[in-house]
Amino acid sequence: MSEVSLVVNGRRVGGVVEDRTLLVQFLREHVGLTGTHVGCDTSQCGACVVHVDGKAVKSCTMLAAQASGSTVVTIEGLANGADLHPVQAAFKEHHGLQCGFCTPGMIMSATDMINRHPEGLDEATVRAELEGNICRCTGYHNIVKAILAASKTRSKSKGKVASKAKKAA
């Protein structure tokens, strides 16, 4: 058994878990944040992407114990109350989802992608970087369109497309 303590969406959480507990399981089953999805259990689909210490991570590939001491942001931590995060708003505006199963991972990957490319993105870069995220419903066209729109918004504002990853006391 491992004792785990981390900050999730600005709130300190912890618990004792089996050593083999994946971060995605900890978030869903222990913290109750079910927006992070389990799609494949093999790290191929990207439905489980979260940010760990500011970087996109497939949470099905990381043990909860490995994340102990880290700051984690899930899809639930992006919006500011009722105000959607700019990437969430772009997905809504550009119809970047259908069934919605892959959407949390896509949005978390897109946010990371935009933050790593402050100069802006082009379609080829977006498509290449989405290779680790699978959507079985769309043709990716509207997902790419949404990410490009959010990237342009970020480039205009020259500010980081940030999440509310606050350190808890």
Image (cartoon, grey):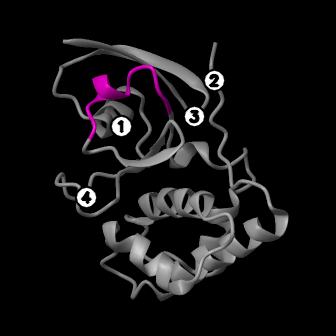
In the image, 90: left or right of 15? right
Marked residue nearer the N-terminal end (4 or 3):
3
Numbered label attached to residue 157: none
**Mark in front: 1 vs 3:** 3
SS at mark 3 in the image: loop
**Mark in front: 2 vs 1:** 2
Residue where numbered disc 2 is placed: 167
Give amino acid for label 1.
Arg
SS at mark 1 in the image: helix
Q: Name the quadrant of the C terminus.
A: top right
Look at 62% across and 48% down and name the residue there.
78
In the rendered view, would you say 128 is above or below 162?
Answer: below
Numbered label attached to residue 9: 3
Look at 28% across and 36% down and name the residue there.
25
In the image, 90: left or right of 128? right
Distance in Å between CA atoms under marks 4 and 1: 13 Å
Give amino acid for label 2.
Lys
In the rendered view, would you say 33 is above or below 50?
Answer: above
Distance in Å between CA atoms under marks 2 and 1: 21 Å
Q: Are marks 2 and 1 in contact (CB under 8 Å)?
A: no
In the image, 159: left or right of 100? right
Residue stretch rendered in magenta on the structure: 62-71
What is the x, y in percent for residue 43? 23, 55
Residue where numbered disc 1 is placed: 28
| Residue 134 placement: quadrant | bottom left
Marked residue nearer the N-terminal end (2 or 4):
4
Residue where numbered disc 4 is placed: 39
Look at 32% across and 40% down and name the residue there.
24
What is the x, y in percent for residue 39? 25, 58
Give amino acid for label 3.
Asn
Marked residue nearer the N-terminal end (4 or 1):
1
